[in-house]
Image (cartoon, rainbow, N blue to C red):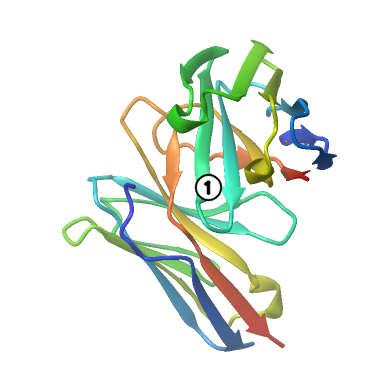
Amino acid sequence: SQWGEENLQALSIQEGEDVTMNCSYKTYTTVVQWYRQKSGKGPAQLILIRSNEREKRSGRLRATLDTSSQSSSLSITGTLATDTAVYFCAKGTGANTGKLTFGHGTILRVHP
Amino acid sequence: DAGVTQTPRHEVAEKGQTIILKCEPVSGHNDLFWYRQTKIQGLELLSYFRSKSLMEDGGAFKDRFKAEMLNSSFSTLKIQPTEPKDSAVYLCASSFGLSGNTLYFGEGSRLIVV
């Protein structure tokens, strides 16, 4: 596995709360992507962050990438019930390939 | 806009049967991927095509799993013979094929083998 040994995690919060999910990876990367998968659907990309960005925002989402600690995080502010999903981090496996490997994911349940 | 289309969405097979899952990637994408998703193992790569050429063929999945891409707009994944442990969601994804590109996923085919 190219990811740290975190298992599938589950978080349960109330609507309006903020939440942060973390990934750590073993092999060097310059790009991390975060995907969200809602029930019965395929994963969909939320945000892509490169090593020269360190932090990237998109609406209520904020991603960070720390290449020194080989970790990335995704924060959601002011969560909504519709944010309920599984969130995955993903990294590429080489410079000349679009292939991604995915972390185990975090199940997020946001209660209205 | 046409995203990745997968059929069938659901399939129930008896042990030993052959099943074929189908995928139409996003038009113009060069890379196509088949992933298997289970709660325990997460997303596992089965096959990877670049411009219709098979680049990677899933290691542990080789013996009963065969993916093909006869043209740039259609791919199949054949499982033969099926076993109960093959019960999973099979996801197809495509991308332009450069490092850092977004993968676009289909909605998946849920397979149950009894």
Q: Is residue A65 visible?
A: no
Q: Nearer the viewer, residue A97 or A5?
A: A5
On the image, the x and y values in percent for residue A101 come to: 42, 43
Image quadrant where residue A14 sits: bottom right
Report whether A70 appears left or right of B90: left
The amino acid pointed to by label 1 is: Leu
Is residue A20 at all visible to an observer of this figure? yes
Residue for point 53% across, 32% down:
B46
Quarter of the figure with the N terminus of chain B: top right
Picture residue at 29% right of the left edge, 55% below the top: A25
Q: Chain of mark 1?
A: B
Q: Residues within 10 Å of mark 1 (few under 14, many from 20)?
A: many
Q: Position of residue B60 (x, y in %)?
A: 46, 32
Q: Secondary structure at mark 1?
A: strand
Question: Where residue A111 sits in the image (x, y, percent)?
Answer: 68, 86
Give the side of residue A73 with respect to residue B38, left or right.
left
Quadrant position of residue A103: bottom left
Residue shown at 75% from the left, 56% from the top: A40
Q: Residue at x 74, y 30 (%)?
A: B16
Residue B24, position in %: x, y? 73, 26
- Near-viewer residue (B39 or B92): B39
Residue named by callout 1: B43
**Vertical order, B1 against A80 (above or below):** above
In the picture, the quarter occupied by the C terminus of chain B is top right
Query: Relative to residue B84, is residue A105 drawn left or right?
Result: left
For the view shown, which residue lies furthest in the left direction? A68
